[in-house]
Image (spheres, helix red, strand yellow):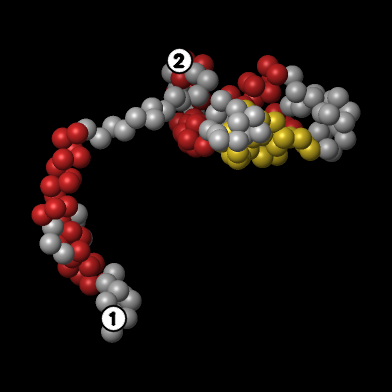
Amino acid sequence: MKHMPFWITEILKKKEISCYSCDNPFHVNSVVGVGVKKSIKNSKKDAVFVDLRCLNCNKTATFEIANHNLLDLAYDILDEIEREAVGEENIPEQDKCSQHRHVSKRTKITKKEMNEMSQFLKNVKTHEDFLTEIGMSPEEIEFYSFKKGKKHGK
């Protein structure tokens, strides 16, 4: 599978997962898909699932990785694409060893920034003024206008 996060291969090696039908061990080549859906263990959380196909009997199985979610998977796929783009040899050793990127759930927006944005929104009189303030030109505003009697883009 292209751009598969490396930690999935590590988990497959460590867990020694085998086919429920013929007991043949699953390998990296057995992975046919990776996705996110509601966890089987905790229905209030999402989890990463790995779809595996037995190379011996062709049966499929799904393996849940409960401590990973959509955000973890997205960052890890981007990391894998970056690794391929720059080449594995250019990545620091500490990055190669990390299991996955831990993403902070807390916002990075400061109280000051929130107050400034709130003040900005209170002072803007019209939608067109708002669009101008965030950098749209009058021509762009006209182009994307959806007023009655106007055709889109004209």
Q: Which mark is residue 25?
A: none
In this view, the residue in front, 27 or 142, is 142
Task: Tell me where residue 137 appears, x and y as whole percent.
Answer: 18, 64
Residue marked by disc 2 = 94
Of circles 2 and 1, which is in front? 1
Which amino acid lies under the numbered mark 1 shown in the image of this protein? Lys
Q: Earlier in the sequence, mark 2 or mark 1?
A: 2
- Provide the secondary structure element on which disc 1 rests: loop
Which amino acid lies under the numbered mark 2 shown in the image of this protein? Gln
State which quadrant residue 105 falls in: top left
Task: Tell me where residue 125 appears, x and y as whole percent.
Answer: 12, 62
All told, the count of numbered labels is 2
In the image: residue 66, left or right of residue 82? right
In this view, the residue in front, 76 or 61, is 61
Furthest toward the left, the residue is 123
For the C terminus, give its image quadrant.
bottom left
The reply to whether residue 26 is in sight is yes
State which quadrant residue 22 falls in: top right
In this view, the residue in front, 85 or 1, is 1
Q: Residues within 10 Å of mark 1 (few under 14, many from 20)?
A: few
Q: Residues within 10 Å of mark 2 (few under 14, many from 20)?
A: few
In this view, the residue in front, 10 or 41, is 41
Furthest toward the bottom, the residue is 149
The reply to whether residue 84 is in sight is no
Task: Tell me where residue 77 appears, x and y as whole percent.
Answer: 52, 35
Residue marked by disc 1 = 148
Q: Residue at x 20, y 70 (%)?
A: 139
In the image: residue 127, left or right of residue 36? left
In the image: residue 82, left or right of residue 129? right
- Provide the secondary structure element on which disc 2 rests: helix
